[in-house]
Amino acid sequence: MNRTRRDIVAAALAAAGPEAFCDPIQLQVRLFLIDRKTPNRIGGPCFDFRPGPLGPADDSLYDDIGTMAATGEAVIDQSGPTTLFRLTEAGRAKGEAVLATLDPPVADYFGRVARWTSLVPYGAMLRSIFREYPEMATKCVVKKRAKVRRTRPDAERGLRPFVEGFVRAFDFFGVMRHPQPGKSKSKSDAEAIEEIWHDVGGFIEDAMVTVGHSERLW
């Protein structure tokens, strides 16, 4: 079956489920992964992704969405701070029809990629992409998360700082607040809590990057 670029776009959007929508970064990453991971199984490569300021980008994707909007297959919502794309009923029917023509593992991959790009924060999403495709990071302007945990001695990595910090944050009776030599002022509760949640966020983001990086079709 011959599939057009817009067929693949419709399928990628439909794979997220009814009433789902995505923003420009999610759309670009979703189609990038599909085009890189399944080219021979969708009649591709279908797109021309290059390094962009927000990760891999094929600007002609927006022309595809514009055409789909003009033909009643998609809606471009610019009422909020971020542009959102979603399929109309006709577009969803087309996307689902295209998905039905794909091999089941490929259609399943479309769904997994759609869910992943919908749920994962931009930072973790792009870090996962750049880990496998470092050439796509050359023009990225998204700031990297500060890796405080990774600058600590090996003995302090992992869960230890989180557990100790968590206990100290709830040490209401000051049992653990012993004076430390050479320090005239102990770390404030606010600083301790901030560091704890920085680490928690780091653990979660690292897990998201690992999941994204480990996604394989076969």
Image (cartoon, grey):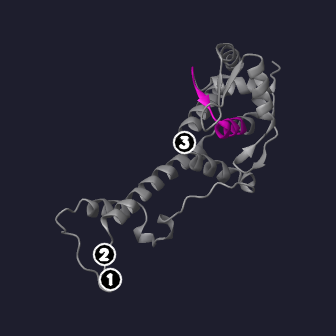
Q: Nearer the viewer, residue 165 or 156?
A: 165
Q: Secondary structure at mark 1?
A: loop
Q: Is residue 218 visible?
A: no
Q: Position of residue 62 (x, y in %)?
A: 76, 33
Q: Is residue 90 visible?
A: yes
- Which of the two labelled residues, at mark 2 and mark 3, occupies the earlier sequence position? 3
Q: Nearer the viewer, residue 22 or 126?
A: 22
Check disc 3 and report the residue beneath it: 120
Residue 97 falls within the magenta-colored stretch: no
The residue type indicated by label 3 comes to Val
Mark 1 or mark 3, whichever is nearer to me: 1
Q: How many marks?
A: 3
Check disc 1 and report the residue beneath it: 183
The residue type indicated by label 1 comes to Lys
The quadrant the N terminus occupies is top right
Q: Secondary structure at mark 3?
A: loop
Q: Most prominent secondary structure in the magenta stretch? A: helix
Q: Relative to 9, say whether 93 is above or below.
A: above
Q: Is residue 197 left or right of residue 130?
A: left
- Confirm or deny contact between disc 2 and disc 1 (CB under 8 A): yes
Q: Secondary structure at mark 2?
A: loop
- Residue 27 occupies quadrant: top right
Residue at x 80% of width, y 30% of height: 63
Label 3: few (<14), some (14–19) or many (≥20) C-alpha neighbours in 10 Å: some
Q: Position of residue 173 (x, y in %)?
A: 16, 65
Label 2: few (<14), some (14–19) or many (≥20) C-alpha neighbours in 10 Å: few
Q: Which residues are magenta?
A: 18-33
Check disc 2 and report the residue beneath it: 186
Residue at x 72% of width, y 51% of height: 53
The quadrant the C terminus occupies is top right
- Residue 191 occupies quadrant: bottom left
- Which of the two labelled residues, at mark 1 and mark 3, occupies the earlier sequence position? 3
